[in-house]
Amino acid sequence: MKQHKGFPGKFFPFLIFSFLVCFANSADAQKIYSKVSKKTVAVNEKFEVNFSYEYQGSSSVNFTPPDLDDFLIFSGPNQSRSISVTNNAATITGSYSYILSARKLGTYQIAGAKFTIEGVTHNIQPITIKVEGSSAQDESGDYANGRDIRNKLFIRAIVDKPTAYLGEQITVSYKIYVSPDVRPEYITHAKLPLYEGFWAEELEGSSNYLTPETYNGTQYNTAILKKAALFPTRSGSLKISPISLTLSVIFSGSSSNYDPFSSYHPGSSSSEEVKISSPVVNVNILPLPNGDTSKYFTGAVGKFSLETKVAKRKFKKNEPVKFQIILNGTGNIELLDVARPTFNKSFEVLDPNITKTKNNSGVISGSKVIEYVLIPRDGGKYSLPAVGFTWFDPQTKTYETLKTKELPITVINEKYNDGLTVETGEEIDIYKSASSFLEEQGTYPAGWFVVLSLFLPLVSAAYFVSYKRKEFARLNDPAYKIKTAAQKLAAEKMSKARLLLNEKNYDKFYSEAATALEGYLITRHGIQLSEMTSAKAEETLISAGKDPAFALEIKKLLDDCELMRFAPVSGKMERMQEVYDRASSIIERLESGEE
């Protein structure tokens, strides 16, 4: 039996491809290739097709997939990307690959694939596939050294509904099934779903522990690898991409008295490397029906409540008024939006502060609070505006609208001064009063000591007012707010990661460490949550002028955190401190601008 020490161990590819390269297009700075593992295959035999690119620069790459209607898609598009830096020039290489099988005999073309790089579209030459005979052996990982493992080790992608409305939550669970005579040792590679066409939110519920389950009359040990809430962003037929794992497994000679949780007893056994993937799941996404959506509809789907609040009803001039819009309910909390209210022109309106709370244990629920700070400049009676919100309820298949009432407030002409806001005229009056006082009083025998003792307090007061005014402007600067919010989020997550590290809670540690870095990048660099991947983070940082080597370091850390969530206990324990130190160092360098 092979001996393996720690994670990730030595990686053995589950297939050794002799690629036939079809050169498609090349330029000095951009190279495009297509590759296929076999040009002649049997019906139902699986093969891999790969579309690759290489270029120098920092712009993003857009991939247009080929027409694959004549084939079954078992996996893909599976994306890979890497960056190498030579003489301060970044060379970016990447690929999109599919695992396919042919449905019937004949000759077919895989055509229509395109790459768009730096505004230039490259059409990839069609690949011709000849299909003849029938498959004697499936080569995708369903066999290991001639051993049929299709019913012994596999992953299911389970969705809670095959049809949903645009924006309605679909829950997908990736579940691994292990026969009692198969013992997974560890995972050497994991390729996670991309969820193209969906806004994705990770759900709680994954597990590192196997539990017994009967499926199709057969006993298995099962575990939830990953759960996600998917919110469709377009209608039509969408594909939920698969999860792929490469595992080192032990096959027992006998399934009797087999305990997957105990150490393995010597006997008739072998350690082998296999690759398994969940199937692609097709879901039908219905467009939202026509109806009276009103001016308050911003695309929300679910079930919600709405209210507005103000702390009190009587204020002084220049006293901040905190006006809150509160949304609660079930649905995509991240995308909830309310049209900006129209406030009286007597109010100075600061940019809103938005806070969210979410429950990710199942159906996404929570609240979103939008708080406007209003500065009333004139006295009088005012009404804070009514707010409306419309959403589509997929249960009743109707649009629902709520509208709050106006909130009356009174602003009295007494000025409010919290030490941050003082009229410019008042600052000038301070200097004027000091000057006139000295002119009237002349010079006392004590000389300049008396003059300074009278003048310095007034100058200090003026300086304090000026400092507070600048401080107020800084605190309300959008860029400063974004930086502060990113720092606060990262600090909170890293503090929690430190506690989990001390508790040796590896189940949650890697998620928290990754969230700290992802949250910082999302907040600071404006990456959409639905697009947040390690590759997207790397691409965004390079586009923002960051050092490509530093961007690659961040990508590797995010990849390690994701991969370690599938690693064995020993591997997780050994690398917790290392991952924590790397995350802390990266965040410190991002904040200090040393990158």
Image (cartoon, rainbow, N blue to C red):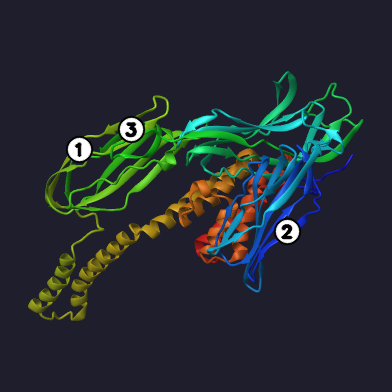
Residue type at mark 2: give it. Cys
Q: Neighbour class for label 1 at 10 Å: few (<14), some, many (≥20)?
A: few
> Is label 3 in contact with label 2 (beta carbons under 8 Å)?
no
Specify the quadrant of the image occupied by residue 428. Answer: bottom left
Q: Which disc, if any, is residue 406?
A: 1
Q: Which residue is mark 3?
A: 291
Relative to 178, say whether 27 is above or below. below
Extreme-top residue of the structure: 217
Q: Please identify, in this view, whether the residue under mark 3 or under mark 2 is nearer the observer.
A: 2
Which of labels 1 and 2 is toward the front?
2
Real-space Cα separation, disc 1 to disc 2, in angstroms: 67 Å
Image disc number at residue 22: 2
Disc 1 residue type (three-letter): Glu
| Dot 1: element | loop
Above-or-below relation of 454 to 530: below
Name the residue type under label 3. Answer: Gly
Q: Residue at x 88, y 42 (%)?
A: 2
**Left or right: residue 420 compared with residue 94:** left
